[in-house]
């Protein structure tokens, strides 16, 4: 090392690459006052001190690339004040110091690897470049979006933002698969301070809650009547109807809870406590309802299309197995959505606690989950529609057969039931999606946007849950007969 450093006052460029250097002693470069370029690349230097660069008053370029460097110790004051470019390519474990960014003439730090920041979602391969503007985090601010007036205040700066705060440096990501470094990521505490559409929204929610109460009551009666009647439980269609009633009962309880809570609080005091649990009920009930609608259609399809082959039927045991699979699948989808939203703190009474987001501005995983759930629901209904076309064709061809004619009446009622499910699921989904992807400026009313995108889908599901028992169970002679007998017994016991 001493032979390399033998006082060469006129040297301006010094290349010490591939010399297997393990350290650079303090003040070892004092004999190079006119040095403007120094390369220590491809050595085994793990620790440096700033004092090692003492005397390099004219050094403008320093290359430390491809060293196992972990730290640069000491005081930087009065040193490297002419440094303009710093190369640190391939250094994985060195943490960039804020004092370096305060060097007056430093313009570029190239190929910085930031392993500690990768877990925060930043690119780990960046270049720091000086600009004419001081980097500062955003100050607290208020903005209005649709019906909402929101206040944002800085809660915590990210690690990269803390490093850049107050400096003249901005960073550029060198990863080819990342468009920009998220160096300016700031965690905001955001809260809503006003909703200009709140009164109108509460009116709709109260109406929805009333319908939800009736839906819960009617479906409770249907479920109780079927599950406690041996005669009804032996009927496969009634088993599926009872399962749908249980799904709609959960949905009714959800709407009743949402309505009672929001009707008795003001917008400013809304919190998310209990929201994940109540949202869990909605998702579980809605998934169960969609799957059961398909099972009802499938059961009628097999009975009518294969009327001459009684061996092709859904038996009671098969129906129980299918119901179990229905709830298993519903629970899986619900639990996955719950874990996804709960982890990202996305459950909110502002969005009715529903784990569905149609907005393309939401987190990517949430948007994909929404598209997946919507696509599965639409797929079930499309298949159900195709099966009913086959049923219709079969009934037309075999209009004279008494058995087919009798079964077709039941199929017609179930068809209306499934048809209403399709209309109240697909139509609002498509309508809300159309409003979101279209130019919102076309819709002058913020209230209309609010209700269409946040209330329409749950409101239609609520109405559908109320209509399901009315359309099918309470129009079925066998169900009504059993229910009348129960009320007759209850009335006689009450008055005797």
Image: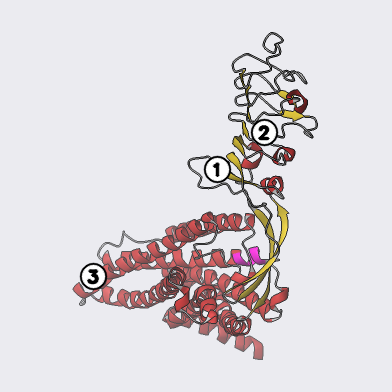
Q: Which residue is mark 1?
A: 173
- Image-based side of 346 in relation to 367, left or right: right
- N-terminal-most mark, 3 or 1: 1
At x 71%, y 37%, the residue is 100
User: Residues under labels 3 and 1: Cα distance?
Assistant: 64 Å
Label 2 with label 1: CB-CB less than 8 Å: no
The residue nearer to you, when weighing 386 against 107, is 107
Q: Residues within 10 Å of mark 1 (few under 14, many from 20)?
A: many
User: Which residue was labeled with disc 3?
Assistant: 394
Magenta part, dominant SS: helix
- 1 with respect to 337 (left or right): right
Q: Mark 2 or 3 closer to N-term?
A: 2
Q: Quadrant of the N terminus?
A: top right
The numbered mark at residue 372 is none
Mark 2 or mark 1, which has the lower sequence index?
A: 2
Is 83 in front, or is 410?
A: 83
The part of the chain drawn in magenta is 275-279
Locate residue 301: give its quadrant.
bottom left
**Crowding near pointer 3: few (<14 within 10 Å), some, many (20+)?**
some
Depth check: give the residue in front, 488 or 63: 63
């Amino acid at each position: 090392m001493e032979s390399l450093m033998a006082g060469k006052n006129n040297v301006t460029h010094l290349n010490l690459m591939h010399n297997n250097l393990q350290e650079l002693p303090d003040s070892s470069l004092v004999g190079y006052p006119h040095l403007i370029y120094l390369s220590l690349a491809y050595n085994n230097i793990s620790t440096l001190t700033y004092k090692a660069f003492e005397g390099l008053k004219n050094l403008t370029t320093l290359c430390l690339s491809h060293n196992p460097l972990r730290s640069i110790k000491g005081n930087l004051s009065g040193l490297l004040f002419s440094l303009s470019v710093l190369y640190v390519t391939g250094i994985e474990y060195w943490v960039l110091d804020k004092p370096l960014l305060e060097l007056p003439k430093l313009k570029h730090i190239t190929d910085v690897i930031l392993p500690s920041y990768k877990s925060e979602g930043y690119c780990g391969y960046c270049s720091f470049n000086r600009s004419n503007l001081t980097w500062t985090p955003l100050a607290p601010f208020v903005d209005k979006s649709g019906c909402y007036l929101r206040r944002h205040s800085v809660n915590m700066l990210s690690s990269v933002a803390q490093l850049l705060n107050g400096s003249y440096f901005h960073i550029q990501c060198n990863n080819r698969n990342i468009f920009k470094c998220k160096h300016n990521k700031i965690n905001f505490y955001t809260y809503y301070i006003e909703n200009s559409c709140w009164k109108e929204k509460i009116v709709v929610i109260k109406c929805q809650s009333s319908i939800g109460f009736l839906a819960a009551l009617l479906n409770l009666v249907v479920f109780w009547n079927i599950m406690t009647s041996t005669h009804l439980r032996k009927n496969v269609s009634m088993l599926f109807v009872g399962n749908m009633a249980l799904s709609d009962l959960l949905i009714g309880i959800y709407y009743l809870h949402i309505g009672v809570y929001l009707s008795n609080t003001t917008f400013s005091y809304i919190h998310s406590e209990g929201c994940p649990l109540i949202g869990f009920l909605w998702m579980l009930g809605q998934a169960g309802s969609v799957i059961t609608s398909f099972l009802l259609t499938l059961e009628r399809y097999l009975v009518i299309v294969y009327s001459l082959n009684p061996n092709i039927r859904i038996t009671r045991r098969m129906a129980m197995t299918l119901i179990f699979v229905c709830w298993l699948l519903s629970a899986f989808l619900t639990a996955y959505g719950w874990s996804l939203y709960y982890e990202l703190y996305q459950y909110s009474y502002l969005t009715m606690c529903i784990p569905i987001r149609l907005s393309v501005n939401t987190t990517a995983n949430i948007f994909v989950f929404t598209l997946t759930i919507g696509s599965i629901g639409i797929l079930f209904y499309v298949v159900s529609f195709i099966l009913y076309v086959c049923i219709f064709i079969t009934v037309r061809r075999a209009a004279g057969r008494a058995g087919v004619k009798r079964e077709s009446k039941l199929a017609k009622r179930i068809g209306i039931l499934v048809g209403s499910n399709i209309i109240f699921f697909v139509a609002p989904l498509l309508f809300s999606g159309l409003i979101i992807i279209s130019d919102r400026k076309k819709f002058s009313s913020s209230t209309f946007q609010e209700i269409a995108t946040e209330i329409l889908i749950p409101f239609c599901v609520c109405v559908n849950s109320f209509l399901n028992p009315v359309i099918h169970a309470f129009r079925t002679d066998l169900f009504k007969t059993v229910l009348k007998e129960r009320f007759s017994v209850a009335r006689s016991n009450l008055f005797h």
